[in-house]
């Protein structure tokens, strides 16, 4: 079974509204996901596989408590979320959400949600790679919501 991930702001494979991008207010979109039996925490990675030089990381969130099944729009700009979850370092060098900002063309933005069988013991500047390494062997289920955005 896959985690069903959705947003009230855009449909899967739909356009991400401008307010969630660098051309707008650059706030994180609202996200919801289904419950996963046995999950002790959730993690989210949002990245852009269409970026010119590499897959560009826009958001890293981990240790979302198991009883949390959604994030409201506009997560705090740095570090810890109100529910105790932590934000890692994105490719903009910040521990926050960094909205879609493609140099040209329309890009896909993958919001991946992972259900884990543990809370992660992570310290310091947690990057996507460090998070993926720590999640190794702990992923119960995962799901994805894809949004698209092109420069206005």
Image (cartoon, rainbow, N blue to C red):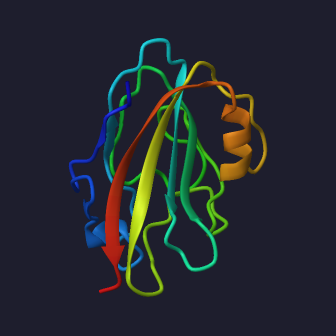
The answer to whether residue 127 shows anywhere in this view is no
**Considering depth in this image, is 95 or 44 the residue closer to the camera?**
44
**Considering depth in this image, is 30 or 76 the residue closer to the camera?**
30
Q: Residue at x 33, y 72 (%)?
A: 149
**Residue 43, horizontal then vertical, whole percent:** 53, 37
**Residue 91, horizontal then vertical, whole percent:** 63, 66
**Residue 23, horizontal then vertical, whole percent:** 36, 80
The image quadrant that residue 122 belongs to is top right
Quadrant where the N terminus sits is: top left
Q: Residue at x 45, y 79 (%)?
A: 102
Q: Residue at x 46, y 39 (%)?
A: 113
**In the drawing, does residue 31 fall left or right of residue 60?**
left
Q: Is residue 74 above or below residue 106?
A: above
**Residue 19, horizontal then vertical, whole percent:** 30, 69
Labels in figure, total: 0
The image quadrant that residue 151 belongs to is bottom left
Quadrant where the C terminus sits is: bottom left
The image quadrant that residue 55 belongs to is bottom right
The outermost residue toward the right is: 124
Q: Is residue 43 above or below residue 22?
A: above
Q: Is residue 90 above or below residue 86?
A: below
**In the drawing, does residue 134 fall left or right of residue 13?**
right
The answer to whether residue 140 shows anywhere in this view is yes
The outermost residue toward the front is: 1
């Amino acid at each position: 079974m896959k985690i069903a991930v959705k947003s009230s702001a855009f449909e899967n494979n739909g356009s991400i509204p401008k307010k969630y991008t660098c051309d707008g207010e650059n706030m994180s979109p609202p996200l919801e996901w289904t419950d996963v039996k046995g999950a002790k925490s959730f993690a989210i990675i949002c990245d852009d596989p269409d970026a010119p030089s590499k897959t560009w990381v826009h958001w890293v969130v981990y240790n979302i408590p198991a009883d949390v099944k959604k994030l409201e729009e506009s997560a705090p700009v740095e570090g810890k979320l109100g529910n105790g979850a932590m934000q890692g370092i994105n490719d903009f060098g910040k521990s926050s959400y960094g909205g879609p900002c493609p140099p040209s063309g329309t890009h896909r933005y993958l919001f991946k949600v992972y259900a884990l069988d543990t809370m992660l013991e992570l310290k310091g500047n947690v990057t996507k790679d460090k998070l993926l390494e720590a999640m190794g062997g702990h992923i119960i289920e995962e799901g994805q919501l894809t949004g698209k955005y092109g420069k206005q």
